[in-house]
Each structure stands twice: as C-alpha cells, then as structure tokens.
Image (tube, rainbow, N blue to C red):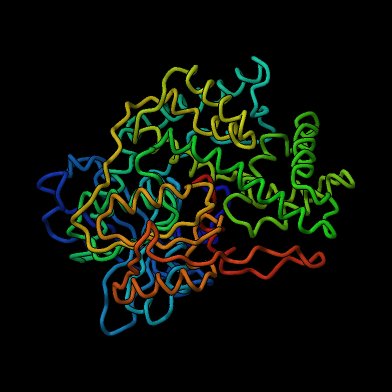
Amino acid sequence: MRTRAAVLCAAAVAAVLAGSVTAAPAQAARPDRPGRAEPARLSWKKCGISDYPRLQCASLKVPLDHAKPSGRQITLALSRVPHTARASLGPLLVNPGGPGGSGLTLAGFVASALPKSVASRYDVVGFDPRGVGRSTPALNCAPGHFEPVRPDSVPGTPAVERANLDRARSFAAACGRRYADVLPYLDTVSAARDLDAVRRALGAQRISYFGYSYGTYLGAVYAKLYPQRVRRLVLDSIVDPTGVWYEDNLGQEYAFNDRHRALMAWIAKYDTTYRLGRDPARIEALWYAMRSALAKKPAGGRVGAAELEDTFMSGAYYDGYWPHLAEAFASYVHRKDTGPLVRTYRNVAAVDASGENGYSVYTAVQCRDAAWPRGWNRWRADGWKVYAKAPLMAWNNTWYNAPCAFWPTAPLKPVDITNRSLPPALLFQATEDAATPYTGGVTAHRLLARSSLVVEQGGGNHGVTLSGNSCLDKHLAAYLGSGTVPRGAGPADAVCAKSPDPKPLKGKSAPTASRGSMLHGLLGFRR
C-alpha cells in the first residue's frame, strides 16, 4: 500500500496521458504464450516533471482478460527515460511493489540513481499496473476507509472485534459492488501478461526487470511465464513465494515486532537526546503506555491507537524515519505535546486518495492471487497467537488483510516460480527486513536456478539498492552493465555491511533529503 503520495505531479501526468495515442493490443494466439501480432505504437510526450525533466509519458491499451484479447480493453499508464548511449540494452522495467504501487516516478529515480554509464544504455520504463494510479480504471473501493480515528486494532472486547469485522466486510462488499466486472482480472498473473504487452509495444525481443518488494513476486511470475523474454532480472527485498499471501503476512508480524524493538534500542542509545532511558525494555513499556493513552484520547483527534501503529510501522520499513518517530515519542512522554506526533502521522502514515487506490488494488490482488481462510475463527486464533509474542502489528496487520476473508471473487492458485530457464538473476536481501523477511530471499535464490544472492548483513531497511549502500550498488551496476553476478559458496553469494544507522535530528530544521529517503518515499510501505 502507498501511504505516502509519490513525488510525481499527478495533474501534469494526467494531462499528458489523456493526450497520448494508445494502440490496440497485440493479439495472442494463446494466453500462456507471448502474443504474435503487429507491435503497438506508443506516443511518448514530456511528462512535465521538474525533478525528472527527461521523463516521458504514454499509455497502452491491453485486454482486461488476456484470454479474450479482442474483448474489453483497459489502459496502462507508462513512463520512460530514454537511453542516450549509442548501444542500447533495451528496456528496463521498474516496479516499486505494493501490490498497488505506482511506478511512474520510479523510472526517473532509477535512471538518475544508477551510474550514468549504466543508465544511459537502458530505456528505463515505469508503469502503473492495472487498477493503479493513472491507469484506467483505477480502483477506490471505499473512500474514507482509513479516516481517523479507527477502532482500536486489538479486539479486547466483542464490541471492538465487531467494529473491525464490520469495516473489513463493508470494504470487501464495496469493492464487489463498484468493481464486480474488474476484480476477477486483478491478479499477479494478469499483471505479468500486461508486462509482456508492454514489451511488445516497446518493440523489444527481451526486457530487463527491476522490482522491489511485491514487485519481486511480479517479476518472478513474469519470468516463469516468459523466461525467453528476460534479459536481466533484479529482485530487491524479496517476497517469500511459498507463503503467498496469508502465511507471508503472519511472518511479517513477528518481524515488525523485532524492528520496533530495534528502534527502542536505538532510542536508548541516544538517551542524552530523548531522555527516555537507557533500557530498551523500559522504553518499549513507555511506548505501550502512550498507545493505551491514545486509545482513550487520540492525539489532536487524529492519532488513536491504530493510527499510532501505522505511524511507527514506517520505522520498520526505513530507519531514516527513526529520528522523527523518536522526537514525536519523546515530546508526548515529556510534555504531552501531541503536535509532533500528529505531524509525523500526517507525513508518513495518513492515507490520501492515492493511498486509498493503493489499498484497493492491494486487497484486490492479494485476495484474488491465493486462498485465504474464510472462517473467522482461524484469523482470530492466529491473531492472538502472534499477539502473545509480537503485539506491535499482530492485529493491525490482521485487520489490514481481513477483507480477504469476505472477498467476492474466488481465489486463484499461487504461481510456483521455480525456474531453470532464466539467465542468471541478481537478488538483494537485508537480514533484518521486516516486510519481506530474510527467508524470502533465501527461498527465491533456491528456486531460481543460477541466481545470485547479495545480502546486507544486519540491515533492516526494506528496499536496499540505490539507497546509499555503495557495496550493494556496486553489484547492481556490474550486473545491469555487463551481466556480472557474484558467486559464493554459502547461501549468500556476496555479503555487504549494512548502511549506518541514522543520527538524531540536529535542531529543528528538517534533514537534507537523501537518496534513501527519496527511494522510500516512492516505495511507501505495507509491502
């Protein structure tokens, strides 16, 4: 889910896309094979984005149902930074994850963050997957679904549990009412078929692909369906493909708790700044006391217990948020000053229309991709089991996914991504990543023959390349530039030291934007 607005100027992009010439889809002889038809023609125009002036935009029509290529068409929004080198390596498609993440601005970021000698050889192509952002139709099942203040996430009474269940049921029902004709075609396999339509429209025999988070599963599924169409494949912060999606979410909940405790330990290290103590366990107790107080009296009428969890979840995804979270925490504890807490919630966790769209697509794809328990007793039992050991996000994450218990479309089967037909792929994984725990990288490495795994030892950020770690970026550049991958003897083919922890803020001024903060603003969180 995207809880932060992308840097992209939506109005400018919308105007450009509205004027783009879209082409008829290439016709596929069989839905499980690449199409054979006249290539689509894309009309590229300047996006008008000052941060990335070379970014161009276009749109492409694809079948809603790839098994009926002449049937109803939907539109994908595309962006690109064209190659400038004389010899091109073709398209590099980039995806920020989600499901539900917009990739339009990510193309500009990746093209600017890669070494010029590498980026100049690619057409770096971003896209809004079906249902997302500037693609049409774009979903928004229940505007205001995350409007604060929500019920306490921990169902301590039957009334609180009923309130949260009612929210989950009503969201699923709203999606079914508004998008009944679209929901059966919002899934990862359909999105992967869209990628091949993009490849054909670009006139490329093969594409390279670079995906973060959920984008790693999308890339692996594309590679499974079209292995002969893959030139290079980069997967960063890797979904466990064997846990799609219920088990993966349970694994997240334990890992989120560990990352929260890492934040408590970091605050203890800087006791002279935050004055919350030197014992992480005591600091954690203060945090839960704050949570209890906000459950009774939300900060600024906006940040209750559930919103506090949303806010501090950002620190599990990116430690660059830690100083802001610590400042807000300390201000509340020492002075009952709720202003910093409300501002931090607004900056990193409040859900706008883009976030509502992201969540709508997140649920649509995850609920359709795989079977979820339909009996609430299973969810309840698992929620309390996790809560006993990892209370931070056990119930918050349960309710976030709970619409899948009531989803109006039947589930598909997850894709077995096992692949022995690919060229060498390059995988990146941090050992302490909470959103996509380390085992996901190890599992994907095992299933993708000839892949190489680069590990950030001790790192906890979600999305680790192009965010300031020169060791990781060296491996990325070597692979995208020449196809070179490291080869090692153990589970990891190469190990990089983690990026340094952040430092407390200096004074009241905002820190200078780093490449890491730019990337994580685009990736957002909730996978």
Q: Residue furthest bottom?
A: 86
Q: Residue furthest front?
A: 489
At 56% from the left and 53% from the top, the residue drawn is: 5
- Judge left or right: residue 448 versus residue 96: left
At 55% from the left and 30% from the top, the residue drawn is: 399
Which residue is more in the foreground, 340 or 183?
340
Where is residue 242? Give x, y as percent: 35, 40
At 75% from the left and 47% from the top, the residue drawn is: 280
Which residue is more in the foreground, 421 or 454?
454
- Judge left or right: residue 432 versus residue 310: left
Where is residue 53? Give x, y as percent: 47, 74
Where is residue 519? Give x, y as percent: 53, 62
Which residue is more in the foreground, 164 or 13?
164
At 11% from the left and 56% from the top, the residue drawn is: 37
Where is residue 179? Give x, y as percent: 39, 32
Examine the image and state in which quarter residue 274 appears: bottom right
Q: Is residue 122 above or below residue 302?
A: below
